[in-house]
Amino acid sequence: MKPSLYNHIIRRRGRPQLLHNIRTKNFLELNPVQSAIYGGLAVPITRNLMNQKDPAVEQLLRQLADLGFFLADEVQEPLELEVRSLEHRFDERRLSLWVQATTRCEEECPDCPYRDDPADLGTGAIERLEGLVSARAGLLRELDVTWFGGEPTINWETVSSLNRKFSDTAASRGFRYRWEVISNGRSHHLKTILISPDSPRRAWLNLGSLDSGEYDAHSTVLLTDFTAWEARRKKLPLLSRIRFQPGKPSARLCRNLSGLCQRTPRFTDDEYEAMRRLLDSGHRLENLPAPALVPCPAVDARSFIMDVRGNLYKCWNSFGQPQQGVPGVDDRLHPNFIRWMDWSPFRQYHCRNCNILPWCLGGCLDRPRDEDCGQWRYSLREILKLLAPAPPEAGLADLSPEAQS
């Protein structure tokens, strides 16, 4: 047997070491004796010299194998990741759509790209959206739609009508339909979104404009920058889900969408302390890395973004530029489609041998190569500590610098 490529040791002062596998998300606490045994097993030279029939060694090795920390010699983890990723990316039974319901909004952001030309989802766009779904209804296993704006509740009559149509189609054709919404989160918007029985699988709300606590903390993610978080953190209910966004929005996107697709942390040491306090307060952090099948929706052959005019895009960085979009969901030979389908970190030597590949999967294809690598590795030690579960006796994790050094 051999150790997984994706094992990491989390060292905690005054407490047992914690072994974590970032592919399986499993944790295993190691006492000093087990740590010494694992250290010997993890290196081929010393592993071959150890007596693996020793009861302590045999017991730990069995436990490591059961939890995915040790694998059979013939297992090729990068190849398994590649196969699973390809199976997911090109699965015709699923379709994921991000739909711009409107460009209208009430926030009066000074740099809003739609201030002078607001528009709702047009008739042509609605017909195209309905056509995309109906043409694939017989093949689909799951359909996911995320409504965004502007403020999508301003055009909620259209959104609700489409939700009902998709739900009815899903019920009659035997597939699952789920929808999400990205909103400014003001109380009158929340009342619109949460009208029974139409409730989203997840609501993404802007913490900076949120003026009500009447939301389901379990299914809601609060979008915020670090300044807004510090001002509001003491008033939030426990177990709130938080996602930190870049402070400066894109020139072509609503602030609520700014950086939403970025999975790689880009935080300073001070911002790391804010994340530590967030978790220490009993909240949940959506920015923490997790194993994925694709690094972003752009390289997913079954994921598309639609603007109010019905134009389709693969990447948020090209949103609003139809010449960089794709003609249709099945135009896979179009250059703008092939560009994203060419993604494969498994062809890169440094990715195939990288011990955090399940997290970043090669990073963002729209940025220079290796730009993401430094961001992950710069904060790897700190991020691993944030991932560590709370000790049972403490209730909440002790994430102070003293305890985590």
Image (cartoon, helix red, strand yellow):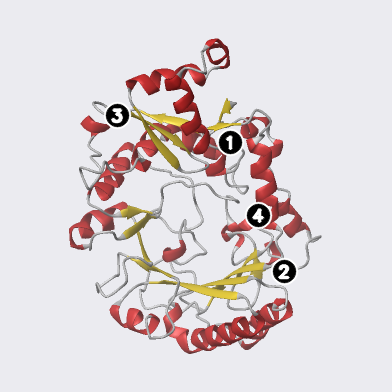
Q: Nearer the viewer, residue 346 or 39?
A: 39
Q: Residue sitting at 61 percent across and 49 percent down?
A: 366
Label located before the other in sequence (3 or 2): 3
Of tags 3 and 1, which is closer to the observer?
A: 3
| Cα separation between marks 3 and 4 | 38 Å
Marks 3,4: beta carbons within 8 A: no
- Residue under numbered circle 1: 370
| Amino acid type, mark 4 | Val
Number of other residues with Cα within 10 Å of mark 3, as a class: few under 14, some 14 to 19, many 20 or more: some
| In the image: residue 120, left or right of residue 212 | right
| Cα separation between marks 1 and 2 | 29 Å
Label located before the other in sequence (1 or 4): 4
Q: Quadrant of residue 88?
A: bottom right
| Amino acid type, mark 3 | Arg
Of tags 3 and 2, which is closer to the observer?
A: 3
Q: Nearer the viewer, residue 33 or 164?
A: 33
- Residue under numbered circle 3: 12
Quadrant containing the C terminus in the rendered view:
top left
| Amino acid type, mark 1 | Asp
Does 317 appear above or below 24? below
- Residue under numbered circle 2: 329
Q: Position of residue 62 (x, y in %)?
A: 50, 31
Q: Residue sitting at 72 percent across and 69 percent down?
A: 329
Q: Which residue of the protein is positioned furthest toward the right in this rendering?
A: 333
- Residue under numbered circle 4: 299
Label located before the other in sequence (4 or 2): 4
